[in-house]
Every structure is written in C-alpha cells, then in structure tokens.
Image (cartoon, helix red, strand yellow):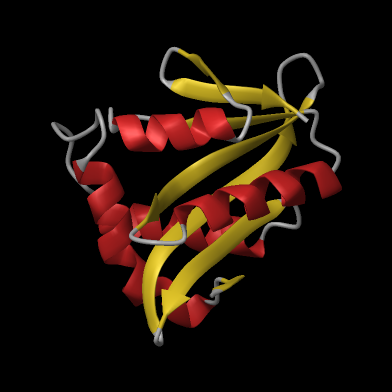
C-alpha cells in the first residue's frame, strides 16, 4: 500500500535512506542521519513536496520523496530526493509522475546513482530518458 509519509515514520524510513546513501556515489562521504531526517521533514511539510511510503503488513519497505520547483529557466520540474523500495517501486514511481503532472510540472527528473539495470529499465518504461545520472521525461 502507498500512503502519505507521516512524522511518525521518520525512524522507520531512516534505514531506507541509509540504504539509498550506501548505494549511491556519495558512499565515501559521512552519512549524517540528522541532516537526512531534517530533509525528510522539510519535504513532507512543503506545499510542493511529495513524501510517500510503500508499506506491506504494517512495515515500511519503500520511500519516495521529491518536490516541484522552477529550474533556472523558470520551468516547473519535479525532482526526487529519496527513492528506494523493496517492492512497490513501479507504483511509487507512477504515483510520483501522476502527482507531478497534477502539480503542473513540465518535466520529471529521477536521480539514478545505483547502476542497477532493472531499475534503469523501469525508469525507461515510464518514459524517462537517461541524461548522465538523471532520468528525465516531459510530462
């Protein structure tokens, strides 16, 4: 089940965020749990923020956070901040893309730092095209 993330989810999603970090290009940097928690809280409270979790049998297994903001050219873009799921990945991605459209975004960007081919194919199946470490698509 996909649902809105809540402040009470903070401790449950921190290990997921750490997993995202460990699979990223930032692995040689220090993981700052308090900074990550602050980012999660800000995104969840932001009017143009998206923070949803994927839950199975009461256990949070996935997370997608992002926001819609104007880029340097004034184009509204939806960008992910945290995205990882052990199940429900396709549903979270589809929900984020639909939310992005509803928010008036013209583009969606998903960062891909893992190198996992199955995940890359999923992004492409949803109409996103690779550009460096980003997958971008017009809405």
The single residue placed furthest to the left in the displayed view is 28
| Residue at figure coordinates x 57%, y 48% from the top left | 93
Q: How many marks?
A: 0
Could one spot residue 32 in this view of the protein? Answer: no
133 w.r.t. 15: above or below:
above
**Residue 125 appears in which quarter of the rendering?**
top right
130 w.r.t. 112: above or below:
above
Query: Whole-percent x and y of residue 18?
Result: 25, 54
Q: Is residue 114 left or right of residue 38?
A: left
Query: Which is nearer the eye, 105 or 33?
Result: 105
134 w.r.t. 4: above or below:
above
- Quadrant in the picture for the C terminus: top right
40 w.r.t. 134: above or below:
below
- Quadrant in the picture for the N terminus: bottom right
| Residue at figure coordinates x 39%, y 86% from the top left | 57
Q: Is residue 94 left or right of residue 135?
A: right
| Residue at figure coordinates x 50%, y 54% from the top left | 64
| Residue at figure coordinates x 56%, y 64% from the top left | 52
**Residue 25 appears in which quarter of the rendering?**
top left
Q: Is residue 42 left or right of residue 58?
A: right
């Amino acid at each position: 089940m996909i649902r809105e993330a809540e402040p009470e989810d903070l401790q449950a999603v921190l290990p997921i965020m750490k997993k995202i970090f460990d699979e990223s290009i930032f692995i040689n940097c220090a993981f700052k749990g308090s900074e990550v928690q602050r980012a999660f809280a800000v995104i969840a409270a932001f009017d143009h923020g998206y923070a949803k979790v994927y839950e199975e049998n009461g256990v949070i297994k996935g997370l997608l956070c992002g926001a819609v903001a104007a880029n340097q050219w004034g184009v509204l873009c939806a960008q992910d901040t945290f995205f990882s799921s052990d199940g429900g990945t396709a549903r979270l991605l589809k929900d984020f893309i639909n939310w992005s459209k509803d928010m008036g975004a013209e583009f969606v960007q998903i960062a891909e730092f893992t190198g996992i081919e199955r995940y890359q194919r999923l992004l492409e199946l949803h109409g996103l095209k690779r550009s460096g470490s980003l997958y971008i698509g017009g809405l």
